[in-house]
Image (cartoon, helix red, strand yellow):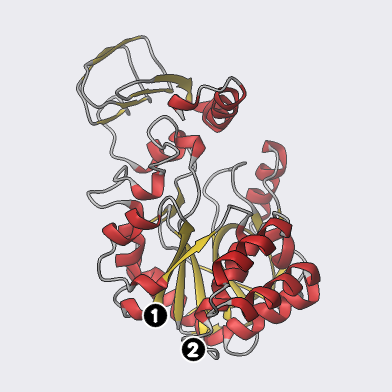
Amino acid sequence: MLALILAGGTGTRLWPKSRKYRPKQLLDIVAKNTMLQETFMRIRPILEPERIFVVTNRTYAPTVKAQLPSLPARNIITEPEGKGTAPCIGLSVLYMKRLDPEAVMASLHADHVIEKPEEFRRALLAAAEVAKEGYLVTLGVKPTQPETGYGYIRQGQLWKEVGGFPVYKAEEFTEKPNFETACSYLEQGCYYWNSGIFVWKLSTIMEEFRQHMPRLYSQLMRMDEAIGTEEEGKILEEIWQEVESESIDQGIMEKSSQVMVIPVDMGWSDVGNWATLADILPKDEANNVIVGGEHIGLDTTGSLLYGTKRLIATVGLKDMIVVETDDIILVCPKSRAQDVKKLVEMLKDKNMEEYL
């Protein structure tokens, strides 16, 4: 098996801690190691560094190398520009197949928290066995609440059991639902959160690109011819300008008839915003999460107080987010955590680049 860690995102919903030149996956916001390092170490017990790849952008590549010194430099893939997970994975497959064209690959995200790594690794190995039979396999997570920030997968018929895990036909992929729909999914009990962790053979995913994303497939074939030549960088840059942005979920997973889902209880969280970060960090007796700097509070409950140097003092806060950095203070209700991304867009519109 090979593994690909996707580490090119900008993490705008975790602004102002996550910034343009130092995104969340390169920060130690959850543990003593960065999220990228945690992801790398999580798969090291089953894979040697030579079989692990990281795809990122040119700006982050030097930091990736510094944070993962045992990763061969040739295994750091840089995309010219962020175009979504479908082109990103497609480009990565072109490099990975040069190491082992018959391999199964696992596609992982650098910003996931997994509290049961042993179970995660067992599930990956089981998924690899299923993938060898030509299937696209995703790890599903049983919902614990009506979450509107995740995509969902509807479980179909039981296929068989592999490595102690039931494997089901995936009937439907749905995008992030509204609250009422998410409640309905929770009640039905046959829907799982889409973890975004996928396992497939390199040859299988390329065939899926050919079937469902023929334009991207054609562009990938042109890039494949250029890789290893003197003109590689120039040609990839030119072709990449033609590539349309698309997620692997919408481009392939929602269209393919070859998708299987393995439900896994692995303590999974996607640290997508400040509210989800607050959910996974330790709480005090008032159900507050206090990180970094000092906090003194009166009638303050259920809040995230994320500081660096200065004292954060609060009165009467409930379910709020306060983030203090050297140059910015963010104050936001937990219920509006997804909207932090809109603030970042406003800063771009106002040309306030120094705060990005």
Where does the image place residue 125, in percent across and percent down from the top left?
Answer: 44, 81
Image quadrant occupied by the N terminus: bottom left
Looking at the rendered structure, the kind of residue marked 2 is: Asp
Residue occupying the far front of the picture: 230
Residue 22, position in %: x, y? 38, 42
Q: Which mark is residue 100?
A: 2
Q: Residue placed at 61% from the left, 77% from the top? A: 226
The one nearer the camera, 50 or 110, is 50
Quarter of the rendering containing residue 310: top left
Name the secondary structure under disc 1: helix
Question: Can residue 26 be seen at all in this image of the molecule?
Answer: yes
Residue 208 vs residue 235, the one in the foreground = 235
Kind of residue at badge 1: Arg
First in sequence, mark 1 or 2: give its number: 1
Given residues 346 and 117, the one toward you in this image is: 346
Q: Position of residue 343 (x, y in %)?
A: 55, 24
| Residue behind mark 1 | 51
Marks 1 & 2, CB-CB < 8 Å contact: yes
Is residue 181 left or right of 114 when viewed as pictured? right
In-image side of 28 versus 56 (left or right): left
* Viewer-proximal residue among 69 and 194: 69
Q: Measuring 30% from the left and 73% from the top, which residue is drawn there? A: 44
In the rendered view, would you say 24 is above or below 294?
Answer: below
Which quarter of the figure has residue 203? bottom right
Question: Which residue corresponds to the image point at 34% horizontal and 65% vertical from the top-left?
Answer: 40
Residue 74: percent from left, percent from top: 39, 74
